[in-house]
Amino acid sequence: MTKFIILLCVFLAGGCATKVDDFSKLDQDLITLLVKKGANINKEHLVSFLIDCSTKQQVSHIMTDAMQYGFEDDYLSYSNKRQVWSTSLTKYIKLDLSEITVNRAKLTPLMPSKGCQPIFWGASVKL
């Protein structure tokens, strides 16, 4: 069984320096793309919320606090190229704009005011 993974990345928002206040259009576009690739929006999918911050301590703190909202941490790594610490916080949810919005809203208060990039997400579709 093949797996097709689609991630909403910073580049879809116009670049790394872009500040995104309203994710709804980006989120809906990604949901539409996932459906075109075969995702069933009536089923839960493993959705990964991507966290990128300048320090390991910031990411570790977010990972710990996110567990109280049912998220699981996937990894903790450093990118020399991008110079950020990263993790993927995963959770099984439906590919629904309100579900994505609600779960991002749970993570947003955990983000420090400085040093972290906007929260993006991705999901896998089994083909």
Image (spheres, rainbow, N blue to C red):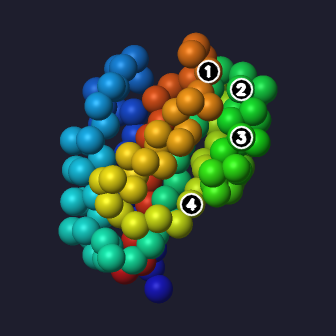
| Residue labelled with disc 4 | 91
Amino acid type at image mark 4:
Lys
First in sequence: mark 1 vs mark 4:
4
Callout 3 secondary element:
helix
> Relative to 22, does residue 43 appear above or below in the rendering?
below
Q: Which mark is residue 58?
A: 2
Between disc 3 and disc 4, the foreground one is 3
Q: Which mark is residue 65?
A: 3
The reply to whether callout 1 and callout 4 are in contact (CB within 8 Å) is no
Mark 3 is on which residue type?
Answer: Asp
Q: CA distance from mark 2 to mark 3?
A: 11 Å
- Tell me whether circle 3 and circle 1 mark residues in contact (CB < 8 Å): no
The three-letter code of the residue at mark 1 reads Pro
Mark yes or no: residue 81 visible.
Answer: no
Which residue type does callout 2 highlight?
Gln
Disc nearer the start of the sequence (2/1): 2
Residue hosting label 1: 112
Q: CA distance from mark 2 to mark 1?
A: 7 Å
Q: Position of residue 126 (x, y in %)?
A: 42, 77
Binning the other alpha carbons within 10 Å of mark 1 as few (below 14), some (14 to 19) or many (20 upward) gives some
